[in-house]
Image: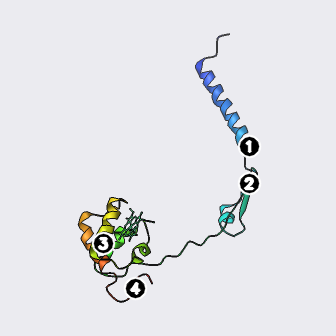
């Protein structure tokens, strides 16, 4: 009898690997899986397996509702200053002179690589320097 040709070998390999996959998939099922809803939902959700237990807890992220008060160029500030930190980071600063604000904005650009257009810096600085202008203390 002649040696089996290539097509026969390929067919045998395919059939063989299908059988292996079937065996693997029928034996490796997780013993028990809970629905995602039950895991994130209640506060007592937990799932165990392989000797450890994952328990879901509910956390309350710190609320930060502070927004930049309306004013000239507030749009630029909203666009450029909220991607990395909250408005509070800015609003809780002491009153600063325009040059000091310029230095901070430049630091955001140069050190922290904030993508602030150079042409927008003066307008942003003007807004920031005007923050304490009224008597109301921003951030309070
Ligand atoms: C690319 C990210 C990024 C952007 C955008 C950004 N900042 Fe910051 N900012 C930082 C980081 C990082 C710190 C330092 C945080 C810390 O020290 O915990 C910081 C800190 C600050 C502080 C605290 C004082 C200081 O000097 O560290 C102020 C005020 C501030 N930023 C203002 C601004 C203003 C105004 C803008 C918009 C013009 C802005 N930031 C945009 C990253 C950014």
Q: What x and y, as percent, mark residue 57?
A: 66, 67
- Residue 12 falls left or right of residue 83: right
According to the image, label 1 marks what residue? 26
Q: Secondary structure at mark 1?
A: helix
Q: Nearer the viewer, residue 23 or 84?
A: 84
- Label 3 CB sits under 8 Å from any ligand 1 atom: no
Q: Name the mark nearer the viewer: 4 or 3.
A: 3
Q: Nearer the viewer, residue 5 or 25?
A: 25
Return the residue found at the far bottom: 135
Which residue lies at the image location 63% right of the left edge and 26% below the top edge? 11
Nearest to N terminus: mark 4 or mark 3: 3
- Residue 83 falls left or right of residue 25: left
Q: Secondary structure at mark 4?
A: loop
Nearest to N terminus: mark 4 or mark 2: 2
Which residue lies at the image location 26% right of the left edge and 73% below the top edge? 123
Q: Name the mark nearer the viewer: 1 or 3.
A: 3
**Picture quadrant of residue 101:** bottom left
According to the image, label 2 marks what residue? 52
According to the image, label 4 marks what residue? 137
For the residues marked 4 and 3, what is the alpha-carbon distance in whole angstroms?
18 Å
């Amino acid at each position: 009898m002649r040696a089996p040709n290539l097509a026969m070998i390929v067919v045998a390999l395919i059939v063989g690997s299908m059988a292996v996959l079937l065996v693997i998939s029928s034996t490796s099922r997780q013993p028990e899986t809970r629905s995602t809803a039950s895991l994130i939902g209640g506060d007592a959700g937990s799932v165990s397996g392989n000797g450890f237990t994952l328990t879901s807890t509910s956390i309350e992220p710190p609320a930060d509702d502070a927004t930049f008060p309306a004013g000239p160029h507030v749009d630029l500030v909203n666009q450029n200053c909220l991607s990395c930190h909250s408005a509070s980071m800015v609003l809780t600063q002491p009153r600063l002179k325009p040059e000091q604000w310029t230095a901070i904005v430049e630091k955001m650009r140069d050190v922290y690589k904030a993508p602030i257009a150079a042409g927008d810096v003066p307008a942003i600085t003007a807004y920031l320097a005007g923050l304490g202008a009224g008597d109301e203390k921003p951030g309070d």
